[in-house]
Amino acid sequence: MRDPYLYDDADVLKNRANIKDTELLRTAEADITNLAMTAIYDRKYDKFNVDTLLDIHRTIFGQIYEWGGEFRTIMMTKPEDVLGGDTVRYAYPKEIKKQLTETMKEVGKLKRTGDNDRDIVFRLTRIIAAIWQTHPFREGNTQTVIVFAVLLAKHLGFEVDHELFRVHSSYVRNAMVWASQGMYSEYQYIERIFFDAILHEDNTEENIAEKKSEKYEKIGDYKVKDYVERPHEYKK
């Protein structure tokens, strides 16, 4: 059975512009989503829940894909070079809403007391990694969860350098992969950029000598510059 998200005559995601060339679609998607991302960081939500996540995805991707703001309906895999070709175990489609609902319960527990900022960001990284591992959407999961995290942090009163996530998008995605390995998850990489973007720890005296360009170059022994985006693969 063929991936229902793809055209019958081309291995390209069905899209509103009816583009059937992979590179042209990638360019169109980047142009459209970049415009949406420019404005979305000014948006304010009263609640941060499953509906908010869906609305963020719809806002970013709804102009290019009809399924923007909808949960995926298929199982997927994606070989990850940072894992030596292995894949993250995403949620089964029928489990997506349930998993997200459970994860969102942790969002409601995030309360700043004036002296617990590091703990808040520590817990936020775990929440965001859990949402990402669920992988609720056919595409656009990383952008969506990062926007969700940034807006949530702003809602909590933090000043967030969201540009840091954009500039180091390949690092962010591979860090998410490492934070989504169940009992083998390693959060140090995603923590690094979250602490820098939210608590601005990259500006502290002990980190001043470390250039940002070098800070996000590697995840373990894997060089982020070698990252090549691969399409998700339909799993029957």
Image: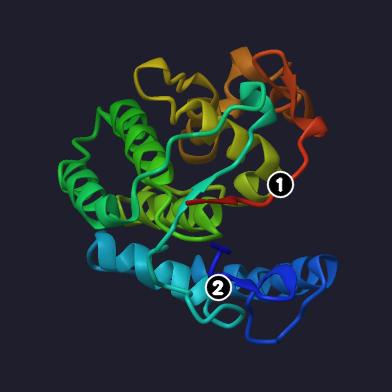
Tell me which residue sits at (65%, 14%) in the image: 220
The percent position of residue 165, horizontal first and vertical second, equals 61, 45
Q: Mark 2–mark 1 contact, CB under 8 Å?
A: no
User: Sequence order check: which comes first, mark 2 or mark 1?
Assistant: 2
Tell me which residue sits at (25%, 28%) in the image: 115
Residue type of the residue flagged with mark 1: Arg
Q: Give SS at disc 2.
A: helix
233 or 135, nearer to the observer: 233
Q: CA distance from mark 2 to mark 1?
A: 18 Å
Is residue 193 among the parts visible in the rendering? no
Q: Give SS at disc 1.
A: loop
The percent position of residue 223, horizontal first and vertical second, equals 77, 23
Most extreme residue toward the front, as rendered? 1
Is residue 123 among the parts visible in the rendering? yes
Q: Residues within 10 Å of mark 1 (few under 14, many from 20)?
A: few
55 or 108, nearer to the observer: 55
The percent position of residue 88, horizontal first and vertical second, equals 49, 34
**Disc number placed over residue 194 in the picture, else none:** none
Say how the picture is coloured: rainbow
The percent position of residue 130, horizontal first and vertical second, equals 35, 39
Counting labels gives 2
Residue type of the residue flagged with mark 2: Phe
Of badges 2 and 1, nearer the viewer stands: 1
Horizontal side, residue 51 vs residue 154: left or right: left
Residue bearing mark 1: 230
Tell me which residue sits at (42%, 72%) in the image: 43
Residue bearing mark 2: 61
Q: Quadrant of the N terminus?
A: bottom right
Task: Name the quadrant containing residue 18.
Answer: bottom right
Horizontal side, residue 176 vs residue 21: left or right: left
Most extreme residue toward the bottom, as rendered? 17
Horizontal side, residue 135 vs residue 234: left or right: left
